[in-house]
Every structure is written in C-alpha cells, then in structure tokens.
Image (cartoon, rainbow, N blue to C red):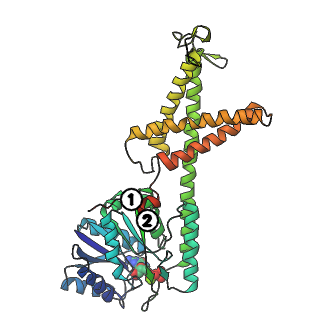
Amino acid sequence: MRLVVNIPTYNEKENIEEIINKVLDQNKKIPQVDLHVLVSDSHSADGTGDIVKRMSRENSRVHYLDVKERGIGVGLIKGHRFSLNKLKADILAQMDGDLSHDPSTLPKMLRYIQEGYDLVNGSRSMAGGKNLLGWHRRFFSRGMSLYCRLVWGTFNLTEYANSYRMFTKKLFKKINFNNVPWKSKTYIVQPAFLYAALISGARIKEVPIIFEDRKKGYSKAQIVAYILDVIKFGVKVRFQKSKTIIKFLMVGSASYVINAFLLGILNRGDLFFLPFLDEPLLLIVPSIGSAPHFLFITFDRLLVSSIIAIQASIIFNFIFHDNWTFKYRSRKGPKIRRFLKFNLTSIGSPLIQLLSILFFARVFNLHEQIGLAIGVIIGLSFNYAVNLLWIWKAPEQSELQSVRAKTI
Ligand SMILES: Nc1nc2c(ncn2[C@@H]2O[C@H](COP(=O)(O)OP(=O)(O)O)[C@@H](O)[C@H]2O)c(=O)[nH]1
Ligand SMILES: [Mg+2]
C-alpha cells in the first residue's frame, strides 16, 4: 500500500530538504506503507526544484513535479493527480513545505484512514490543537472558521483553512473538481476541497495539530484576496442550498397539481368546474350512499380516489426528490427503503394540516383557511427537515465517531 505525501512549494529552498527527510523518517513508525514524497512546485525561482531533483536522483521515494503555474491549489490538485496516475498512490496526504506541520502526526492520520475514515483533517482549533501564527492570522483563521460553520451549517468541523490532510484515493476520485476553484491564486482550495469532500459524503475525522510559524523563507498568503474568495465561496454554497429549497417547493407544487387533477377525474370527472370526462373514472366504486362500511370507515369513491391520488403524488414527489432535489446528497441503503420512509413521513404533513385547521378553528375561532395555510407551512417545513435529516441525509459527524473499523 502506497502513501504519497504531496508538498506544494513556491520558493522553499531553505526548508524543503529538511521537511522531506523528516517525512521519510516517519516510515519507521508506519512500516506497513510504502511512503513516498512528492514536491509539486510552481516553477520556483530560488532553486527549490534543483534541490528536490537532486534528492530524487539519490532516493527513489522522492519525486518532483513542476506544475509550472502559480497557486497552491494547482500544486495540490495536479500533484494528487500525478500521485494517483503516475505514482500509483493508494492514500494521499498533503502538508506545507515550510515545517509548519509536524510530520509526526502522519502515523496517527494513517491510523484513522485505516479505521475507515475517508479524510483526516489536521485542526488547530480543536482541543489539543494550537495555532502559533501572529494574532492577525489567528484572528483571520477564527473568523473564517466561524463564517464557514455558519454559512455551510457544519457545526462539527473546527478547521477549514489548514492544509495538513490525509485522504483516500476513493474520496479523491469521487470529488467533482468543477465545483472547486483550485486554480485560484489564493488558498481557497483548502475550504473548497473540504466542502466538496463533505458533499461527496466523506467520513471526516479531525486530529489536533500544532501549527508552527515558519522559521525560514517568507509567507505567500494573500489574506485580503483570500477573505474575498472565502466570502464568495460561502455565497455560492448558500445559493446551492437555497436551490434545494426552491426545487423542493417546485416538486411539491407540481405534485399538488397531479394530486388535485387525479382526485378530480377519478371522483367526479372534472376539476373544480372544468369538466374533463362525462363521468367519474372510478365509476365502479360506489358513492357514499351505497358504499360498504367497515368499522368507522366508508369505502366510497371519494376515499378510494383520494388514496390513489395522494399515493400517485407521493410517488411523483419521491422520484423527483431522489433524482433531482436531493441528488447531490449522499444516499445510503436501498431505494425502496428511502421510498417507504418517504411514504411514512408524507403522512406527517396532512396530519399537521388537519390538527392546525382544528386547533385554530376550535381554540381561536379562526377561519379554517387560516389554519390550513399555517398547517401547510408547518407541514412543508416538517417534510423538508425530515427529508434532509433522515431520508437523504449526508453523514453527520456524530455518526463518524462510531464508524465501524474497516481494514483497507
Ligand atoms: N505549488 C505552489 N505552492 C505554493 C504556492 N504558494 C504557496 N505555496 C506553498 O504552500 C505552503 C503554504 O504556504 P505559506 O506561504 O507558508 O502560507 P502560510 O503558511 O499560510 O503563511 C508552502 O509549502 C508554500 O510553499 C504556489 O503558488 N504554488
Ligand atoms: Mg506557512
């Protein structure tokens, strides 16, 4: 099993040799993997490339890739692709080339990957973690984390910006890079990659790390441009999420039309005052006067037509939600189980509407249409919430803690 640690660099001649050696040293602690280091360099002008090329001639575990263009995202993504395609990596990792990340965390990260996590993320903000950068950089990291947490709604992740990560080849292949602005000149690739991993249903584990400030060389971070990119990305994520609600409401409206139309033609042959058929489609089912009774229920045409119409609209809803509205969310288990869950929760909304009509009419003496309108809003919110949290849910962090150990 091969693990490739990708180090993106731009002008790191003072640090690169030391960090490569320190990473390779870790192999003693994790002899079960074939550890390699890849330096993905943006054509540094300071001779970083020459140092790495010399090292790669002396040691077959060291590799050099000139990604030519500037940008840490270019180094990372092109580097990971190279690791997969050329170096045949099974597990991918990435860390900074300025000794800010301590390579001795690598064995711990590997352990979690081997336990079945898809992505292990080094965190400076969780218990045991530390950020030793200056106060303004710490302030920026904290602010950015808070923004991402609130906007993305990921309250269990503490770190968004850090680059020290390990993940599986399977996860990397699953990620849709069209949604990751990795060619940007800022470090937006860090949060954007994390978000793309979440969307792909990645099981994520955070491990505490201590982030040292670099001792040599200079920082290439462009904080103002980075802040703007993070804000822009957050707006995009929010819009994506609103799109889900809009789709949900569109499918719901269409299914109401189907429901009403079917009920009309089955029960009466018309829709309100619009005649469609000469007689009800369900003529064979008797109307209330001659219908059979069972316990308190009369099996008349209205009841049978309602059940058929409602069930048809539920099926319509399900097909569109499964293939369109919630398509981007991870789906676990067989489709039939999701369908049964959906049917079960679909009862919730009419029940809420009925209770709301009765409650507002009987308790507050309000018109039944007011109760119905309130009931529809509560019912729809209820359905939307259970759809997101139960039927088409992306895995929660809390679930991740209890993930079953799985050997790779
Ligand atoms: N390939 C590549 N790597 C870069 C680029 N800019 C920064 N890096 C690397 O990304 C890592 C983090 O950059 P650094 O300047 O230390 O940012 P800071 O830690 O946020 O101050 C280091 O290994 C840099 O050499 C770039 O344009 N291309
Ligand atoms: Mg740095």
The reply to whether the C-beta atoms of the residues labelled 1 and 2 are less than 8 Å apart is yes
x, y percentage for residue 167?
35, 67
Q: Is residue 79 visible?
A: no
Residue 210, above or below 386: below
Residue occupying the point 59% across, 73% down:
143
Query: 366 left or right of 386?
Result: right
Looking at the image, how many numbered discs can be counted on the residues? Answer: 2
* Quadrant placement of the C terminus: bottom left
Q: Position of residue 404 (x, y in %)?
A: 34, 59
Question: Which residue lies most toward the top here?
Answer: 290
Q: Which residue is mark 1?
A: 175
At label 2, the amino acid type is Phe
- Residue 402, image quadrant: bottom left
Residue type of the residue flagged with mark 1:
Ile
Residue 251, given in percent of the width and then of the height, sits at 54, 38
* Residue named by callout 2: 193
Vertical placement of residue 382 versus 180, above or below: above
Q: Is residue 319 above or below residue 58?
A: above
| Residue toward you, 179 or 249 | 249
The crowd level at tag 2 (other Cα within 10 Å; few <14, some 14-19, many 20+) is many
Please name whichever residue, 399 or 197, is drawn nearer the observer in this view of the structure. Answer: 399
Residue 9 appears left or right of 380: left
Q: What residue sits 33% from the left and 67% below the top? A: 113
Q: Position of residue 367 (x, y in %)?
A: 78, 32
Circle nearer the N terminus (1, 2): 1
> Which residue is painted at 71% across and 32% down in the image?
358
Classify 69 as above or below 299.
Answer: below
Which residue is at the front of the view, 305 or 98?
A: 305
Q: Quadrant of ligand 2?
A: bottom left
Asked if the residue at label 1 sits under 8 Å from ligand 1, the reply is no
Measure the C-alpha gap from mark 1 to mark 2.
8 Å
